[in-house]
Amino acid sequence: MKLQRNNGLRATALAALAVSGALVLTACGSDNNAGDTTGGAGDKTAAATNIKCDDAKGQLMASGSSAQKNAMDLWVKNYMAACTGVEINYKSSSSGEGIVAFNQGTVGFAGSDSALKPEEVAESKKICSGGQGINLPMVGGPIAIGYNVPGVENLVLDAPTIAKIFNSDIKKWNDPAIAKLNPGAKLPDKAIQAFHRSEDSGTTQNLGKYLGKAAPNEWKYEAEKKWPAKGGQAASGSAGVAAQVKQVEGAIGYFELSYATSQSIPTVDISTGAAAPVKATSENASKAIAAAKIEGTGKDLALKLDYATKAEGAYPIVLVTYEIVCDKGNKADSLSTVKSFLTYTASDEGQKVLSEAGYAPIPAEINAKVRETVNSLS
């Protein structure tokens, strides 16, 4: 597609917006300017002028984490409106599938809610000529525990209780452990329908890390991408779990906060041992993510999170989604597009999109290193 002047440029930009705009606005549900089409379009155009397209061209394939899907939809929409003639195709599947696709060489980058394992890094060296796969933290946010119990608002749970629910050890909503955390609530004598991810998922792994650290006596499973516990029901992707919780009375499940926000699914407040239970918000997740430390070496920026935090107002069930790329040996035909797109997502403008969509931006000092690393990719 060649860049055309005036009407051609407008038509191309509007076409790109039409492809993803409806899905993004439906999924995120956080833009209240839908009725102000003139002002909204002006804002989007102004933002798009700050995106540096550089030598980006053609189609860039990427896949992985469904937790970052709503953020990725917004980024892709904004980027394609600015960089006409470029198509970013992000397939929302799962972290596990994204890593497999990356190590098979079928995508320019992958999204994963957990850092590459040593064996996955070793596998990546076959694809990254002279280099290896590295983790670039790009999206932060809370893993919300959504529930469907009519008449029950501001439900409070702690880590041991959540662990017992998802391990099928607590089976009724009026269980004494839940009642003790929610005095005065009218909890029904109704079966709990717990939903988890059906495929390998970084979101599952991060929930497992939280439960393993905060409720070690109740959750004795290793934190893996594959769901480890007995019982429960499976659904595909964060969207699938959220849909089941929305539809099934008595349900509970876990997914990135924007899925709860977009579908008006109530979320659990977490009792951490702090003075008050902590709500699942991007601001509260940011307080937890801000304490993260870089544990990767070289250009790898994998983070270590404190899942057992008791800091006031810090929401403990958080994830960081990484964009996985080669430090060296990226495909020549997609390298310029990968660098251009990830430069935008890591920019102040790109990170601001996260806050507006219910995600948590990456802390500034870590994000500065992400930008430096993106610039050095080869």
Image (cartoon, rainbow, N blue to C red):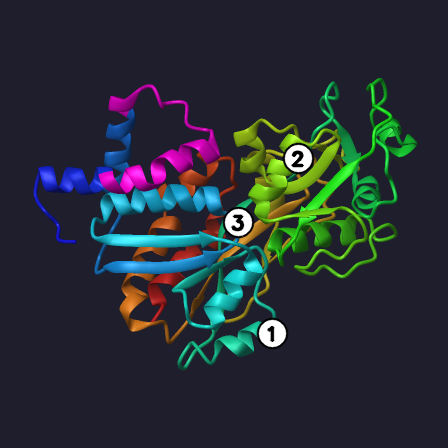
Residue 16 x, y percent position in the rendering: 27, 42
In front: label 1 or label 2: 2
Q: Secondary structure at mark 2?
A: helix
Q: Which residue is mark 3?
A: 66
Q: Examine the structure image and report whether residue 35 is included in the region drawn in magenta.
A: yes
Q: Which residues are magenta?
A: 15-39
Residue 244 x, y percent position in the rendering: 64, 37
Q: Which residue is mark 2?
A: 245
Residue 153 x, y percent position in the rendering: 72, 21
- Seen from the viewer's position, the closer of residues 81 and 21 is 21
Mark 1–mark 3 CB contact (< 8 Å): no
Residue type at mark 3? Answer: Ser
Residue at position x 75%, y 31% in the image: 250
Q: Main secondary structure of the magenta part?
A: helix
Q: Which residue is mark 1?
A: 118
Residue 54 x, y percent position in the rendering: 22, 57
* CA separation in Å, label 2 and label 3: 17 Å
